[in-house]
Amino acid sequence: MKRVIFKIAGALLGAAGLFYIGDYAVLRYRIARNLTPYGSVTVNVYYAVPQKNGRMEYDFGSSQPEACVNSILPHAGYAACWYLRRHSDQPIQL
């Protein structure tokens, strides 16, 4: 029974690794062919400031563009554009 579980776990890890490598290869191809590998999403930044009474005060900053990659997974230190579009409000905890 343990052998079957280890084989399934190994197969899942291998599939995840192949998926990541494939996504990275597609990104490198898009970079080489200049097929819009990078994008930009406007992100709303706000500061979450704790007060002495235990409540949070929210101070909204300005909107700023953030670079992202047009892929399924994050690569090269950039977040995926689909993720940033869904999470465009980014709090900064102080």
Image (cartoon, rainbow, N blue to C red):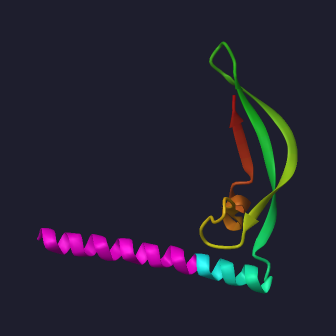
Q: Which region is colored magenta?
A: 1-23
Q: Is residue 51 above or below residue 22?
A: above
Observer-nearest residue: 13 or 58? 13
Q: Quick check: 43 above or below 13?
A: above
Q: Is residue 12 magenta?
A: yes
Please tell me which residue lies in front, 33 or 50: 33
Q: Residue at x 85, y 38 (%)?
A: 61
Q: Is residue 11 left or right of residue 66?
A: left
In the rendering, at what x and y percent does residue 65 appear? 85, 55
Residue sitting at the far bottom: 33
Residue at the top extreme of this rendering: 52
| Residue at the far front in the pictured view | 32
The residue located at (22%, 70%) in the rendering is: 6
8 relative to 30 in the view: left or right = left
Q: Residue at x 71, y 59 (%)?
A: 84
* Magenta stretch, main secondary structure class: helix
Q: Is residue 22 left or right of residue 32?
A: left
Residue 42 sits in quarter: bottom right
Q: Is residue 2 magenta?
A: yes
Which quadrant of the view contains residue 27? Answer: bottom right
Where is residue 54 shown, x and y percent of the image?
62, 18
Give x and y (percent) for residue 82: 68, 67
Name the residue located 80 percent from the left edge and 82 percent from the top edge.
Answer: 34
Q: Name the quadrant of the N terminus.
A: bottom left
